[in-house]
Image (cartoon, rainbow, N blue to C red):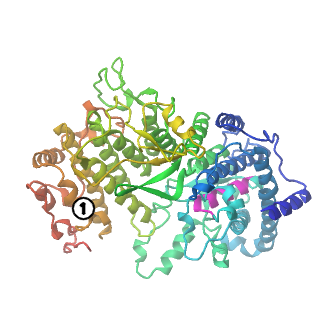
Amino acid sequence: MTQARTMAMAVATQKKNTIQLNDNGPMNIYSHEELTTQFQNDVKSLSTKSAHDDVVDPKKIEQDYLKVAIWNFVVGYCEALSTHKDSTRRYSLFPVPFRALCQLVLEEFLPLLNDAKQKSASVATSNSTNNSTKNGSSAQLRHRQAVQTIANIIWKRAQNKKCGTLMQDELHANSLYTCLCGDVDGKSLDCFGAASLVVVGMNLSGLGNSCLTLSEDHAYESHSKQLNDGETKDAVIVRGTCEVAIPGNTKTAQSKRGREISETFSSQNQSSTQRKKLDAITAETSWLYMAKNPVICENAGMVLAAMIGNVNCDVEKQKLKTGEEKMPVVSGPLYKLKRDLLWVLHDAGFMKKIPFALIELGDCEEHMSSERGMEWIDVTGLVQGAKCDSNNGNEGGKIAVLRNEKLFMDAIHISRKLYDDSQAYPYLYAGHYHKDAGRDDPTQEYRLVESLRFYSEASRVASKYQYDSRDCMQLMKHMCTVASLIYRDILMHPFSNISSTSSAGTITSSTTSVCGSDEVVTTAQNTGNPSEGDTAASSSSSGTIENNNDKSNNKQPRKWQLQKNAIAAITWLLSFYDSLFHWEEREGQSFVEILGLRHKHSFAKMLGTFDLDSRRGAVETMLDGSNNNTTDKRIQAVTENQLQYFQNPRSQRLVKDSLLIQALLKEKVIVKELDMAIPSNELGRVRKRRRQ
């Protein structure tokens, strides 16, 4: 590390045009408040204009992205410091050697970019004549060559993992700190880390018009095709893309970086002998690339928001047993830091187009609440035909929710408005929030209905995409996880409820100390006390928190307090399955794991937790078809007096008098293989049985 730093300093002194900070900041930062203030000052100076806007000074873009690089390095340093799997190697965040960290960026990262810029210019010059007509305009070729060169140098600088490991699945591998100092903990880069650093590098190298582009599980580079020679601003219609998150330093891996995403799909489809060309997945039908609706980070502030949102507070591979369950351990101080930095970016307007950043802020508030997160916010306009009362934070006929919940609602609204309702994660996070709020509090039972409603919305979004085993692998994992959460936390309940009842809108919690003052144990739910999370985090040197739900196998089917809640819950559980059924029927194949008869959270097992009367009422309500409000996308907030019910299933397996419906109307839910088979289509093909 010392040798590399010395060599970088020598190289940096030879560069004439190295970017310099206008203000290097304090030598050391000694507290959370001081770090947040420094961050806020830097965020205020960031431009809100797009990188390709003609009125933006290129030097301003470079200065903005330098601040992004520095803060990515600083926060990555804090993440590495507080999340090591070995407790003897987890440290307090403060003091932060801020000036030294800034110098590391200037002395080690910028020289890498200068080298990449020179290599890119040299290669582009030698190849432009031969390839300009074959691969596009010379400007496009130069841009792709620059992306490829910077990506290759970044991957070469990052640590190489052992053969057989998946870099993309590694924790705490998404920052500039990991890239430059990964040798300390043996870390490499994940796909987000690689893509974000390439975009930062492009803009720091004066090669603007490069944007970080995000789906729900992938990241890549995109740019306006205004780069074509001789074209004017009016000619900008579509964006070019560059794949960069390809791990490894082989010639094959290096050559694939910088390619258009469509070329990546083309090569994959050509190499697959099992897929018909007509059914081949494309960038326009892929979930991994968010079809035609990716989130484009148009300026440095949006890139920074995405980076802070990607901070992982989990302590790697450190899980403690509680009864039969293993619960993750997280860093309290890092959660608090992430939360407050995201609020700074939220207030500056850099998160208004990034649903992911909003739900991550909501997640931070759920696990470590602040006074701001516990404020009541009026959302009356989001509830159609609302009938209000004075309870649940409602005053003067208004509907109010905690600001924490409003963050999830905002993320859903943005996804619907800007991205054609193409994101499942906002619904999943909202579902988790309501599940945690209602699972142990009888007065909040309606929240379990809301949780199922949001989970069903997530499965509906998933069903919009064309299925591909590689492309949808992570999406399938989420559906399995949701099924597990539904069964464990909503449909089942401990014989004795040890949690205390909370006031409306707050979430129950119990906090106890273990191992002296070094660690605290807290539930995954939030507390109504805005200072309690801070106390837990600051009560120890490492501030480690364990998400301990104190669960056991001693459970029984939930005894619903109100039958209307049980009926509504069943309809939304059926909605969750309906979208998955419909997805399979549209694709003409069985691929959803949780639809298997022998799955531990099978259809029959889940629905069998409800009594017959509730199932009958739910089937009658679902097939009635008179409630048109269930599909009104203006409805996002629901109170106990405004329950919604799912109606009008799309799947042929849930139509009136179908085998599954008949099974639901019997005392014991028994589902056979033929009941779950994909129905024949209009061409008269036989029913397809599921592969068990």
Residue 216 versus residue 329: which sits nearer the camera? 329
User: Which residue in the structure is indicated by mark 1?
Assistant: 602
Q: Position of residue 2 (x, y in %)?
A: 81, 61
Left or right of 274: which side holds 12? right
Relative to 622, 323 lies left or right: right
Residue found at x 47% / y 48%: 546
- Label 1 crowd bin: few (<14), some (14–19), many (20+), radius 10 Å: some
Of the residues shown, which amino acid type is indicated by label 1?
Ser
For the N terminus, the image quarter is bottom right
Q: Give the range drawn in magenta.
A: 188-203
On screen, residue 216 versus residue 153, left or right, reads left
Q: Is residue 168 above or below residue 542?
A: below
| Residue 403 is inside the magenta segment | no
Residue lying at the far top in this picture: please name it.
396
- Estimate the x, y position of residue 683 in percent, counting from the top left: 22, 72
Give me the residue at 30% from left, 48% from top.
489
Q: Which residue is drawn at 73% across and 41% down?
A: 55
Q: Quadrant of residue 341?
A: top right
Q: Can residue 647 be seen in this view?
A: no
**Residue 198 drawn in magenta:** yes
| Magenta stretch: dominant secondary structure | helix
Figure label count: 1
Residue 294 falls left or right of residue 126: left
* Residue sitting farthest toward the bottom: 273
Residue furthest front as drawn: 516
Is residue 457 positioned above or below 161 on the image?
above
Q: Quadrant of the C terminus?
A: bottom left
Res. 437 image quadrant: top left
Residues 373 and 30: in front is: 30
